Image: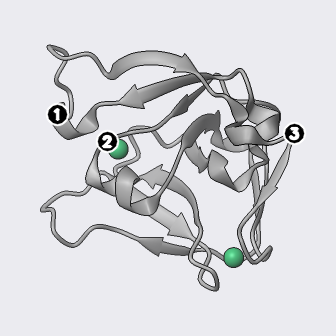
Amino acid sequence: VKGDCLCGRVAVTVPGRPELLNECNCAFCLKLGALWGYYSAADVTVAGETRAYVREDLADPQLRGHHCPTCGSTVSWTARDGSAADTLAINMRLFDPGDLRGVKLVFGDARNRAEGDRSRPEYKPATTFDGLGAR
Ligand SMILES: [Zn+2]
Ligand SMILES: [Zn+2]
C-alpha cells in the first residue's frame, strides 16, 4: 500500500493496512496532525527527502518527527533513545482513507498518561475508521 505527501515528493510504502490507527491527544500528535499506524521499520520504505523535528520545549523528548520539507506533511516518527528502534510510526493520513475503512481506530491518551505509567489505559475506547467519506 502506497501513500504520499501533499506535494508528492515523499512516498511511503507499507506492507498492508496497520493493525490499528491511533489518533492521540498529546501536543506532538495533535499539532503534527497525524493519524498513526505502526510498522516494523524493516517493512516500510520512505522515498524522498524528509526533515526531522525534535521538540525544543521538553528536557528529554522521546520522539523525532519527520516531515516533507516542501509541503510540510507529517510523514513519521521515530524513537530518539533506541528503545523502540524497530518501530516506525507512519502518518496514515498520507494514504487513501478509503483503503483504511474498517481498521480499528483508537484514541491515544498520551496527554494524560506519563511515559511508563501503567495505571491509566493507553487508549480511550476504540471504534472503527469510517474512511472519511472516500469511495
Ligand atoms: Zn511534500
Ligand atoms: Zn501523542
SS class of the residue under badge 3?
loop
Residue lying at the far bottom in this picture: please name it.
70
Q: Amino acid at mark 3?
A: Arg
- Whether the residues at callouts 2 and 3 have beta carbons within 8 Å, the answer is no
Q: Report which quarter residue 133 is drawn in.
A: top right
Task: Check disc 3 and report the residue beneath it.
Answer: 135
Q: How far apart, in angstroms, are the residues tagged by discs 3 and 1?
A: 35 Å
| Circle 3 crowding by C-alpha within 10 Å: few under 14, some 14–19, many from 20 | few
**Residue found at x 18% / y 17%:** 120
Task: Check disc 2 and report the residue beneath it.
Answer: 25
Q: Amino acid at mark 1?
A: Asn
Q: Is residue 114 visible?
A: no
For residue 11, side relative to residue 109 (left or right) = right
Q: How many marks?
A: 3
Quadrant of the rendering where the N terminus is positioned: top right
Task: Check disc 1 and report the residue beneath it.
Answer: 112
SS class of the residue under badge 2?
loop
- Whether the residues at callouts 3 and 1 have beta carbons within 8 Å, the answer is no
**Viewer-proximal residue among 63 and 123:** 123
Q: Quadrant of ligand 2?
A: top left
Q: Amino acid at mark 2?
A: Asn
Q: Is residue 128 visible?
A: yes
Q: Earlier in the sequence, mark 2 or mark 1?
A: 2
- Whether the residues at callouts 2 and 1 have beta carbons within 8 Å, the answer is yes
Q: How far apart, in angstroms, are the residues tagged by discs 2 and 3?
A: 28 Å
Q: Is mark 3 within 8 Å of ligand 1?
A: no
**Residue found at x 12% / y 62%:** 59
For residue 50, side relative to residue 127 (left or right) = right
For residue 116, side relative to residue 131 (left or right) = left
Q: How is the image coloured?
A: one colour
